[in-house]
Amino acid sequence: MYRSILVPLDGSPLGEQAVPAAVALCRLTAARLHLVHVRTVDWLLGRGEDMPDERSYLEAVCGGVSNDLGESVSFALLPHDEPRRLGPNPAPAEVAARLTDYARTNGIGLIVMATHGRGGFSRLYFGSVVEALLATVETPLLLIRPTVEADPDRWKGTHPLRRILVPVAGAMAEAIIDAAHDLGSSTGASFTLLRVVALPTPAYEPLAPVASIASPQDLDAARRAAEEELQRLAEPLRKAGHQTTIDIAVGHSPANAILECARSGQYDAITLGTHARRGIDRMLLGSVANKVLRAADCPTLVVPPAATAEEREPRADQSSTPESR
C-alpha cells in the first residue's frame, strides 16, 4: 500500500492528465497526494504563453481534487528557496534531481506523471525527465499517456487498474512483481505474468524480459522452463488472494510480443523493470522497455532497480516542506 503519491506538474493540461489516476489510488490506499512543480524561468518570461502564477496554479489543482481527498493533498514549489528558479531550458537531470530529492525526503511510494507535457507530443517526458528520473530515483513511476484533448473534468474519475500485465525475467522478477502487487492490491486486480521466449535474432536487446534460446530446436525446453519459473513466481500472488495467470509468448521481437499480449488481453496497466543505472544499458533508450513505453495504450508502471520498501522510507535527517491546502 502507498502512503504518499507524487504528481509532478508543468502547468499544462496534458501534464495534468496524470492527476485522476493518482487521486483514484490515493482514495483507495488513503495515501497523501503531493503535487509538485519545479520552477523555471519559463514562468517568469511566459515565452509567449499565458502562464499562471505557480502558487495559484497549484492551489487551483488542490481545490480541484479536494472533494475526493479533503485535506490529504499538499503542494510544493521546487527549489524551495525563493525566488530561485532553474534556467529557461533546464537540463532534464536538473529537474529530475529536484524531484528525486523530494521523493526521498517525503517517503514517496509512487510517482505518477504524464508522458507528455507543456510542449505537447513533440516534447516527450520519458525521453528526457523520465529518463533522468529512472537513472536516480528509487521510486516506481506510473506513466500515463495523455489524450490530445484535455477532459473538462480532468481532475475527476479514472478507469480502475483491475488487470495488470507483468512481463518478468531475470534478477528483478520479484521486485517487478512486488511493485505490480502494490499497484493492484487496492483494486483487487488480477495479474498475468508473461515470459517472452525469444527466437534467434541478430538484434541484441539487453533489457528484454525474455527466456533466450540458442536455436528453434530448444523451443519446447525453453517453454517448459519458463512455465515452471512463472508458476513459482505466481505463487505468492495467489496466496495473497489474487487471481494470477501465466502466459508465454514466442517471437523475434520481445517488445512486439509484450504489446500484442497487452492489446489482445485488454489490460489496464503494464509493469516493466529497468536494469543498469550506468553505461550502455542505463535506462531504456533502444531497449524493449522503451519500445513498449512508446507504443502502449495503457498506463505503464516502470520499476527502477532499487525500488524497495526500505528505500522509500523518509530519511530521519531530512524534513519535508510541502504546503497543505
Image: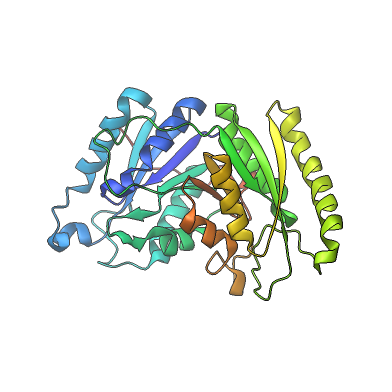
Placement of 319 over or under 206, stated as above or below: above
Q: Can residue 187 be seen?
A: yes
Which quarter shows the N terminus? top right
User: Residue 271 location in percent, x, y?
Assistant: 58, 47
Looking at the image, which residue is at 61% across and 43% down?
165
- 323 relative to 126 in the view: left or right: left
From the viewer's perspective, tell me whether residue 132 is left or right of residue 196: left
| Left or right: 150, with 295 as reference point | left
Tell me: residue 316, above or below residue 137: above
At 56% across and 37% down in the image, what residue appears?
A: 183
260 or 240: which is nearer to us?
Answer: 260
At x 45% / y 43%, what residue is drawn? 319
Q: Position of residue 277 (x, y in %)?
A: 59, 65
Looking at the rendered image, the quarter that the C terminus falls into is top left
Residue 24 location in percent, x, y? 43, 30
Seen in the picture, residue 288 relative to 71 is either above or below; the reply is: below
Residue 107 makes an appearance in the image: no
Q: How far from the left and from the top, in percent, is residue 128?
A: 41, 64
Residue drawn at point x = 58 percent, y = 58 percent: 256
Question: Residue 211, relative to residue 31: is it above or below?
Answer: below
Q: How is the image coloured?
A: rainbow
Hey, which quadrant is residue 42 in on the image?
A: bottom left
Counting the numbered discs, the total is 0
